[in-house]
Image (cartoon, helix red, strand yellow):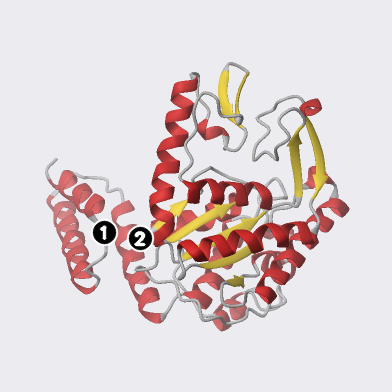
């Protein structure tokens, strides 16, 4: 992870190669005292991992990666209700020698139904406990297209390579998304009056839909989020990750080899925008100090048994303790344990 820089610095770095996207300042501030729930596409997962690496209080995708707004809404409702899955749950299916949930990512699948249920319910229980204290829910929509299981009548989060004949495919209407989320946000506020929803649209292109259909899908999502922000300006905000990728970077050098996903450099660029908008100065200072320590811990010496390396580790341990004195809520037990383990080798 690179160090943080202001938007002006970023533009200077890429001068002549980008068209800067205006990002609107909001009253939302993200600090290390702010519990964050991250939901949605694999772009949300990228942001969630960076928040976790930065030692934020973060719960990331309790259902795994979800792409469409209805599946994300269903997941949030189940988390609010404290839902648990059992053998009779309609979401459970067996396919290809594994048990799957049609609402969950393949990482929850298992060779036995019991193991699959255990994985699902452990995360659901944790998420149900986490949700009432959450101050910020970051939701990233990936596509407006949904797959509905013909027999069960439900919109699924994951098809798990079941036959295409098992599903119908449809594109959600803007008002359909707005209606679903208006009711959902009202329920969230009743449970947790302090919660705020920060929406983004994933810059990842769904080329299997076709380029035109992908654009229609993204437009539907953008219109729905814009309407929600108009209806509930105190509870909803938007971060333009999609526009930064499409308009500010706008070059294949910023894509991964598949030409669909943002490259690490692009993700870093979007993350810097995110930090510039939402992190107060004190949070940025902490992240700068922590990143230096984290990089030092990642250093692998030629002679780990040498006295010089042991002194190096002792200095890292001292820096962690000093940082913890400044930020009492900072949890670095794992890193301190790593230092002690290496020192005692």
* Residue located at (57% from left, 67% from top): 198
Crowd band around label 2 with a 10 angstrom C-alpha radius: few (<14), some (14–19), many (20+): some
Position of residue 171 in the picture relative to residue 196 (left or right): right
Q: What residue would you read off at disc 2?
A: 55
User: How far from the left and from the top, in percent, is residue 162?
Assistant: 71, 25
Residue 229 percent coordinates (x, y):
66, 73
Relative to residue 214, is residue 181 drawn left or right?
A: left
Outermost residue, right side: 212
Q: Position of residue 86 (x, y in %)?
A: 49, 28
Describe the element under mark 1 as helix, strand or loop: loop
In this view, the residue in front, 343 or 262, is: 262
Q: Nearer the viewer, residue 220 or 275?
A: 220
Write down the residue under mark 1. Answer: 331
Q: Is residue 167 above or below residue 127?
A: above
Quick one: label 1, few (<14), some, or many (20+) residues within 10 Å?
Answer: some
Q: Residue at x 69, y 58 (%)?
A: 203
Instruction: Please tell me whether residue 128 is drawn above or below residue 269 in the rendered image.
Output: above
């Amino acid at each position: 992870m690179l160090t943080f820089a202001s938007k002006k610095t970023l533009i200077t770095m890429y001068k002549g190669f980008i068209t800067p996207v205006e990002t609107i300042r909001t009253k939302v501030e993200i600090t290390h005292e702010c519990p964050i729930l991250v939901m949605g596409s694999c772009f949300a997962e990228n942001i969630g991992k960076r928040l976790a690496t930065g030692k934020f209080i973060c719960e990331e995708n309790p259902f795994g990666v979800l792409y469409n707004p209805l599946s994300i809404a269903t997941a949030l409702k189940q988390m609010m209700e404290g839902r648990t899955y059992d053998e009779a749950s309609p979401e459970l299916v067996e396919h290809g020698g594994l048990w799957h949930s049609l609402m969950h990512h393949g990482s929850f699948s298992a060779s036995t139904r019991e193991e699959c249920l255990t994985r699902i319910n452990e995360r659901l229980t944790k998420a149900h406990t986490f949700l009432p204290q959450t101050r910020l829910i970051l939701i990233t929509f990936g596509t407006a297209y949904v797959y509905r299981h013909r027999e069960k009548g439900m919109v699924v989060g994951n098809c798990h390579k079941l036959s295409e004949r098992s599903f119908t495919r449809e594109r959600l209407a803007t008002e359909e998304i707005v209606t679903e989320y208006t009711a959902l946000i009202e329920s969230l506020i009743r449970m947790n009056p302090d919660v705020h929803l920060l929406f983004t649209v994933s810059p990842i292109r769904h080329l299997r839909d076709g380029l035109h259909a992908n654009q229609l899908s993204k437009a539907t999502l953008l219109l729905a989020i814009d309407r929600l922000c108009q209806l509930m300006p105190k509870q909803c905000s938007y971060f333009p990750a999609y526009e930064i990728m499409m308009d500010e970077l706008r070059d294949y050098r910023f894509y991964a080899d598949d030409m669909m996903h943002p490259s690490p450099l692009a993700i870093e660029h979007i993350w810097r925008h995110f930090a510039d908008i939402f992190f107060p100065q004190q949070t940025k200072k902490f992240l700068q100090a922590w990143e230096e320590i984290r990089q030092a811990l990642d250093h692998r010496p030629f002679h780990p048994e040498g006295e010089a390396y042991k002194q190096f580790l002792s200095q890292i341990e001292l820096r962690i303790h000093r940082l913890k004195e400044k930020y009492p809520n900072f949890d670095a037990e794992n890193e301190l344990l790593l230092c002690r383990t290496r020192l005692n080798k």
